[in-house]
């Protein structure tokens, strides 16, 4: 009978040790999951761009006729018209939307 009680005691200690191990494993996994999610959230929210107001100004359309095979001169002429209209639109609205009025439009 004494031998049986020793085996039962050993088995009981083993079950308690296993239960403690399972609890420790659970908490390690739980804390690990929280830390990895916090790391992921930190990466997401620190790399997102900051919201700033964005103003879009739309000008009048330019006249373009469809040409199947345009020459370089025709392309350059249309580009010149586009740049002139874009510059005029910028100069017209820069006083309303820019803090620094001395900025000029630079097309490269």
Image: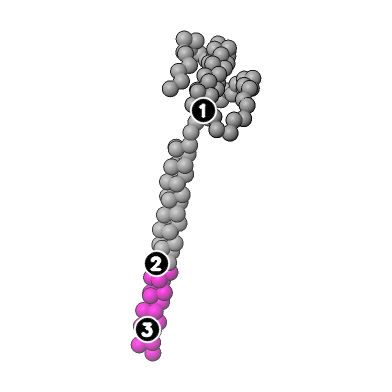
The N terminus sits in image quarter: bottom left
- Left or right of 13? Residue 69 is right
Query: Is the Cβ of the residue at disc 1 closer than 8 Å to that at disc 3?
Result: no
Rounded to the nearest whole Å, what is the CA distance between mark 3 and mark 2? 21 Å
- Left or right of 67? Residue 1 is left
* Residue 4, picture quadrant: bottom left
Sooner in the amino-acid sequence: mark 3 or mark 2: 3
- Magenta stretch: residue 91 in it? no
Rounded to the nearest whole Å, what is the CA distance between mark 2 and mark 1? 79 Å
Q: Which residue is mark 3?
A: 7
Instruction: Identify which residue is drawn at 63% across, 26% down.
Output: 65
Sooner in the amino-acid sequence: mark 1 or mark 3: 3
Sooner in the amino-acid sequence: mark 2 or mark 1: 2
Q: Which residue is mark 1?
A: 71
Please state which of residues 98 and 51 is positioned toward the viewer in this rendering: 98
Which element is circle 2 on?
helix
Looking at the picture, does residue 38 appear above or below residue 89?
Answer: below
Query: Where does the image place residue 70, in percent across and percent down from the top left?
Result: 54, 29
Query: Where does the image place residue 57, in percent across and percent down from the top left?
Result: 60, 21
- Residue 21 has which mark? 2
């Amino acid at each position: 009978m004494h031998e049986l009680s020793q085996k039962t005691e050993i088995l009981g200690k083993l079950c308690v040790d296993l239960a403690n191990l399972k609890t420790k494993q659970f908490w390690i996994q739980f804390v690990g999951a929280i830390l990895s999610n916090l790391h992921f959230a930190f990466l997401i929210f620190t790399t997102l761009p900051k919201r700033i107001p964005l103003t879009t100004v739309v000008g009048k359309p330019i006249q373009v006729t469809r040409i199947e095979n345009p020459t370089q001169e025709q392309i350059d002429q249309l580009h010149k018209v586009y740049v002139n209209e874009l510059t005029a639109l910028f100069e017209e609205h820069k006083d309303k939307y820019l803090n620094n009025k001395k900025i000029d439009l630079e097309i490269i």
